Image: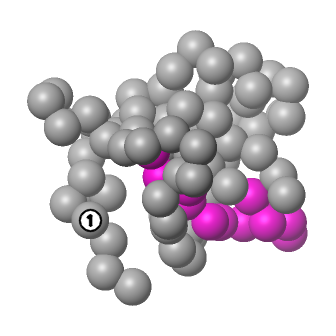
Amino acid sequence: MAWPTWWEWELELTSHVQRRMVDREFTEVDLRRMLEVATAYRDDPLIEGRFVVETRHRGADWEVIVEPDEADHWLVVVTAYPL
């Protein structure tokens, strides 16, 4: 799979994902690893300009929602959750 140019941009974590990290018991290191081992991405069906990244963590399927910030070249991580 060919990844878009924004895939290489530095991450910016929203306050929402930071709260979910506590609730769902994963760290920023875990999140970065999830993105490293991601297998696919697709358009978010709910919000234009966002993408759903398919990955795995702790032996389970997860999704990470990201939104590229074209103006500042940040890849904003909105949330992450197990399926």
Work out whether 72 lies above or below 65. Answer: above
Q: Main secondary structure of the magenta part?
A: strand
Furthest toward the bottom, the residue is 1
| Residue type marked 1 | Pro
Give the magenta range. 50-62
On screen, residue 55 above or below 71: below
When the figure is inspected, residue 19 is found, relative to residue 80, above or below; the finding is above
Q: Which residue is mark 1?
A: 4
Q: Position of residue 22 (x, y in %)?
A: 80, 23
Any part of residue 32 in sight = no
The answer to whether residue 79 is left or right of residue 73 is right
**Residue 15 visible in the displayed image:** yes
**In the image, what residue occupies the spot 86% across and 25% down?**
23
Display colour scheme:
one colour
Please provide percent x and percent y for residue 55.
65, 66
In percent of the image, x 32 and y 57: which residue is there?
7
Q: Which image quarter is the C terminus in?
A: bottom right
Residue drawn where x is 13% and y is 30% of the image: 71
Mark 1 element type: loop
Judged left or right of residue 1, residue 18 is right
The quadrant of the image that shows the N terminus is: bottom left
20 up-or-down from 77: above or below: above
Is 54 one of the magenta-colored residues? yes
Residue drawn at point x = 25 percent, y = 53 percent = 6
Residue 29 in the image: state x and y as whole percent: 59, 42
Residue 17 in which image quadrant: top right
